[in-house]
Image (tube, grey):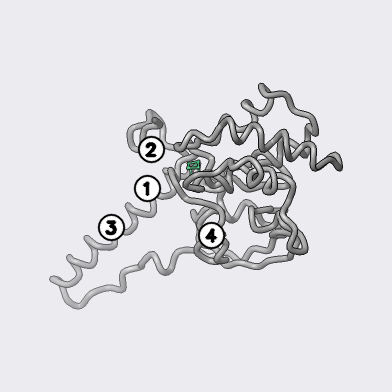
Amino acid sequence: MHPPDSEKPGLSRRGFLKGTGLSVAAVGLVKSATAAQEAPAAEVPTLSAAQTHEISFELNGQTTQAKVRTGHTLLETLRDQLDLTGTKLVCDQGSCGACTVHLDGKPVNSCLVFATDVAGRQITTIEGLAKNGNLHPVQAGFLHEDASQCGFCTPGMIMSCKALLDRNPSPTRDECKEAISGNICRCGTYFNIFRAVDHAATLMKGGR
Ligand code: FES
Ligand code: FES
């Protein structure tokens, strides 16, 4: 298990920003309490005045605008602002892979990516895989091989498996293990996932 940011020897960039936000909030609360006792109160800056940024990026093939706050993650933006809840929030610290999406075609943990950093870039989520009502071969492979139980890891797994097949149409079992090594399935469906990748590889080559 990964220790929480507060127990790590060095603070992560994201942890620092989040911590800074909490510190600002805490200072704001203390100031508010003090100000309530010492009238007249000066105006106390609040987090609602935190910087927001208008960003534009390509999301599942569509140009998309979003207003994001400093320190917000891509995962928060996808789920809370853009209502794309297929990408799952589980550990929120980069250790489970449930939040995997593609950034410029490469798999990333969206809980570790600042939303402001995706401006002008391409994001693909699980919602962007099916085309014209047809599942992507990797999705079809997961269905065919019954590679999902609770389903919480599944969107992130599928995104990692798709990235693998995009760069390597005929992966070995070891290459498949390596590709999903950052994705944790608590239900233990790994063998079905390996077979799903084999099935998807066949489909992508035009087989059945
Ligand atoms: S929720 Fe992002 S890696 Fe676990
Ligand atoms: S299917 Fe439950 S965590 Fe993978």
In the picture, the quarter occupied by the C terminus is top right
Provide residue 62's location: percent of width, then percent of height: 74, 64
Q: CA distance from mark 2 to mark 3?
A: 21 Å
Q: Residue at x 41, y 36 (%)?
A: 11
Q: Is residue 193 left or right of residue 128?
A: left
Q: CA distance from mark 1 to mark 4?
A: 26 Å
Does the CB distance between marks 2 and 1 fall below 8 Å? yes
Residue type at mark 3: give it: Val
Q: Is residue 50 left or right of residue 148?
A: left
Quick check: 171 left or right of 110?
right
For the point 51% across and 48% down, which residue is it? 151
| In the displayed structure image, the side of residue 11 where residue 134 appears, left or right | right
**Residue 192, which numbered label?**
none
Q: What residue is disc 4 on?
A: 85
Q: Earlier in the sequence, mark 2 or mark 1?
A: 2
Q: CA–CA distance between discs 4 and 3? A: 33 Å
Task: Give the number of the mark in front: 1 or 3.
Answer: 1
Tag 3 residue:
27
